[in-house]
């Protein structure tokens, strides 16, 4: 994958997270509604700063990471989504993550973003992708099921229980040619 790739889908732009997104990220993480289904819940400024550093380091090390979601009709970011390598049960997995700020819920932004990121992954990689979803987060379960993620099992991580959802590799294959 190209380092620091920007993506676009209709009215939605995805750009790699940058240091100047720190204040916005801190506000996102301080919202109980936004963080209700995220292990550990709300985060203070120091935790938000640590998470930003993790996101920046991931982009630098792997050339992929979290993208800030921007909508053409609003000046501030509406969320973030992307990919990161994570450890689960002594295995390194490529995890998809998504958080949309509450004022932008139920506007089909999640659907647009998931489709665009997975199209990008399918064109560049041949890998399995996982998502860890809170058992009560039915909207996220439904959203990812639309894109081929399937429930695998419950796992314990970060002192909470999550559902492991898996999407098998979907790399495009060349058309079959008959002789």
Image (spheres, helix red, strand yellow):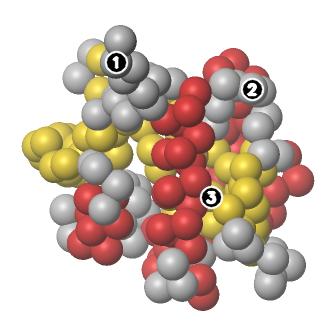
Question: In the rendering, which numbered label is found on residue 178?
Answer: 1
Nearest to viewer (mark 1 / mark 2): 1
Q: Residue at x 74, y 26 (%)?
A: 2
Residue bearing mark 3: 80
Q: Earlier in the sequence, mark 1 or mark 3?
A: 3
Is residue 51 shown to the viewer in this render?
no
Query: In x, y percent, where is residue 66?
Result: 63, 45
Whichever of labels 3 and 2 marks the residue nearer the N terminus, that label is 2
Q: Residues within 10 Å of mark 2 (few under 14, many from 20)?
A: few
Which residue is depicted at the point 60% across and 87% down?
Answer: 103
Q: Position of residue 49 (x, y in %)?
A: 71, 48
Numbered label tally: 3
C-alpha gap between disc 1 and disc 3: 44 Å
Q: Is residue 134 left or right of residue 81?
A: left
Q: Residue at x 16, y 49 (%)?
A: 151
Q: Which mark is residue 2?
A: 2
Q: Quadrant of residue 68?
A: bottom right
For mark 3, give the secondary structure: strand
Q: Earlier in the sequence, mark 1 or mark 2?
A: 2
Residue 89 against residue 160 in the figure, above or below: above
Secondary-structure class at tag 2: loop
Numbered disc 1: secondary structure: loop
Q: CA distance from mark 3 to mark 2?
A: 19 Å
Q: Position of residue 78 (x, y in %)?
A: 68, 72
Q: Quadrant of the N terminus?
A: top right
Q: CA distance from mark 1 to mark 2?
A: 34 Å
């Amino acid at each position: 994958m190209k380092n620091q790739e920007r993506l676009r889908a209709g009215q939605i732009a995805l750009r790699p997270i940058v240091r100047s997104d720190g204040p916005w990220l801190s506000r996102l993480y301080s919202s109980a509604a936004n963080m209700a289904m995220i292990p550990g819940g709300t985060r203070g400024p120091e935790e938000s700063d640590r998470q930003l550093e993790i996101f920046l380091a991931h982009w630098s090390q792997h050339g992929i990471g979290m993208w800030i979601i921007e909508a053409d009709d609003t000046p501030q970011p509406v969320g973030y989504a992307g990919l990161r390598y994570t450890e689960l049960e002594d295995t390194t997995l490529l995890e998809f993550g998504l958080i949309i700020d509450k004022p932008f819920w139920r506007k089909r932004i999640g659907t647009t973003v998931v489709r665009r990121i997975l199209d990008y992954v399918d064109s560049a990689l041949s890998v399995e992708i996982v998502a860890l979803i809170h058992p009560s987060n039915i909207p996220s379960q439904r959203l990812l099921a639309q894109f081929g993620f399937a429930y695998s099992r419950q796992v314990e991580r970060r002192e909470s229980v999550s559902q492991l959802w898996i999407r098998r590799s979907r790399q495009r294959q060349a058309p079959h040619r008959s002789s």
